[in-house]
Image (cartoon, rainbow, N blue to C red):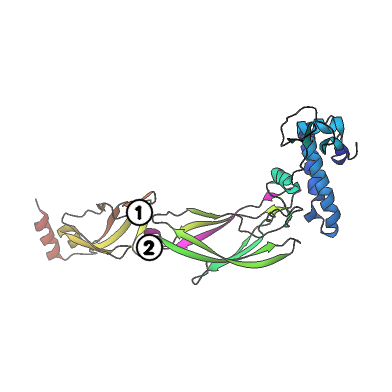
Amino acid sequence: MGVDYYKILNVDKNAKDEDLKKSYRKLAMKWHPDKNPNNKKAAEAKFKEISEAYDVLSDPQKRAIYDQYGEEGLKGQVPPPDAAGPGGATYFQTGDGPNVFRFNPRNADDIFAEFFGFSSPFGGMGSGGGGGMRGGGTRFSSSMFGGDDIFSSFGERGPVSSGPRKAPPIEQKLACTLEELYKGATKRMKISREIADASGKTMPVEEILTIDIKPGWKKGTKITFPEKGNEQPNVIPSDLIFIIDEKPHSVFTRDGNDLIVTQRITLAEALTGYTVRLTTLDGRNLNVPINRVIEPSYEEVVPNEGMPIPKDPSRRGNLRIKFNIKFPNRLTSEQKSGVRKLLSP
C-alpha cells in the first residue's frame, strides 16, 4: 500500500471522524515546525505527512480510494470506484483512457488553521509560509502622544496551554474632560509592546493608536483595539480596551444626557428675580432670566442645552439649574420688622 496513513495518525482502520480529529490535533501541535526550531526541517516533513494523512482519511471519497487501491490509487494510476465524489476530488478525461482521479494534497497550514484559527500558534510563519498567529500580551506601556501620561503599564500573564488561547483583555481608564465628551475629540496614544519573529524571539515596537471620542460618549464607554498586547508563544494577544472616564468639571456635573449646574444666590435674589449667566461647554454665553420666586427646591430646566445624545448628536439633553440660597445669619430688629411688613398678607 506504500504510505500507511492510519499508522501516521496513530488510528485504526475503523477510526471515526472524531478519532481522526483528536489524533490530528495532538500530532499537529507536537510536530508543528515552529515548535521544533532545533529540528525544523524534519518537523516540517512530519507535519506535512500528518496533514496529508488527515486530508485523505477525513474525506470519504479519498479514503475509499485509498482503502481500495492504496497510495497508487490517489496518484491516479488505477481508476476510482466511481467517476465523481466530494471533498475536492477532481477528474479529467484523457484522450484514450478512463476517467482518472487526481489527488491534490491540501496545504498543511490551511488544515491546521481550520482547527486552531491560525496557521501558527508559536509566533512563526508556519511550514507553508502562512501568516503566523501572535501570542498573548504580558507587559504593556503607553502614554499620550504629545500630551499627559495616561498610563504607565499593563500586566497580564497566564499559563500557556497546549493549544492557542486568548489572553485576558487589558483594560485602562481613559480620562476625558467634559468639553471633550461634549464636542468630541481625537486622542493619539503611543504604545510600546513586544512582538515575536519567526524564531520566537521578541522585540519591542512602538505604535500610535488613534481614538476618536464621539460627542455624547458616557463614562464607561469602551474602545477596543484587538490583539494589541504583547506576543508570547501559543497565546493570542490580549485585546487592549480603553474605558472612558470623566474628569471633574468646575461648573457642570453630568447626569446621563443632562448637565447640572448649581448657582449660589442671595435671599434677596431668590425673592426678587435673578439672571443665570453661564459659558457653555462649547464656549457660548448663555443668559437664563428667572422672574419668579426661587424656592430652595426649585430647578430651572433649559431644554436642548445638555450633552449630545450619542445616537443622534443633533439632539441634546437638558440643562438643569439648581440653586443654593444663602440665608442671612441674623437680622436686626428693624430688618425683621421690615420683612414682616413686606411679607404680611
Seen at 67% across and 64% down, the residue is 194
Secondary structure beneath label 1: strand
| C-alpha distance separating marks 2 and 1 | 11 Å
Q: Is residue 91 above or below residue 212?
A: above
Residue 53 x %, y %:
82, 40
Label 2, on which residue?
Answer: 179
Q: Is residue 58 above or below residue 328?
A: above
The 10 Å Cα crowd at callout 2, few under 14, some 14 to 19, many 20 or more, is some
Residue 232 x %, y %:
71, 58
The image quarter in which residue 153 lies = bottom right
Residue 138 x %, y %:
67, 60
Q: Amino acid at mark 1?
A: Pro
Seen at 67% across and 62% down, the residue is 195
Q: Is residue 72 above or below residue 133?
A: above
Q: Nearer the viewer, residue 237 or 318?
A: 237
The region drawn magenta spans 159-183
On the question of residue 266 being in view, the answer is: no
Q: Amino acid at mark 2?
A: Glu
Residue 318 x %, y %:
30, 52
Seen at 84% across and 51% down, the residue is 45
Left or right of residue 334: residue 12: right
Is residue 160 located in the magenta-colored stretch of the structure?
A: yes
Is residue 147 located in the magenta-colored stretch of the structure?
A: no
The image quarter in which residue 290 lies = bottom left
Label 1, on which residue?
Answer: 308
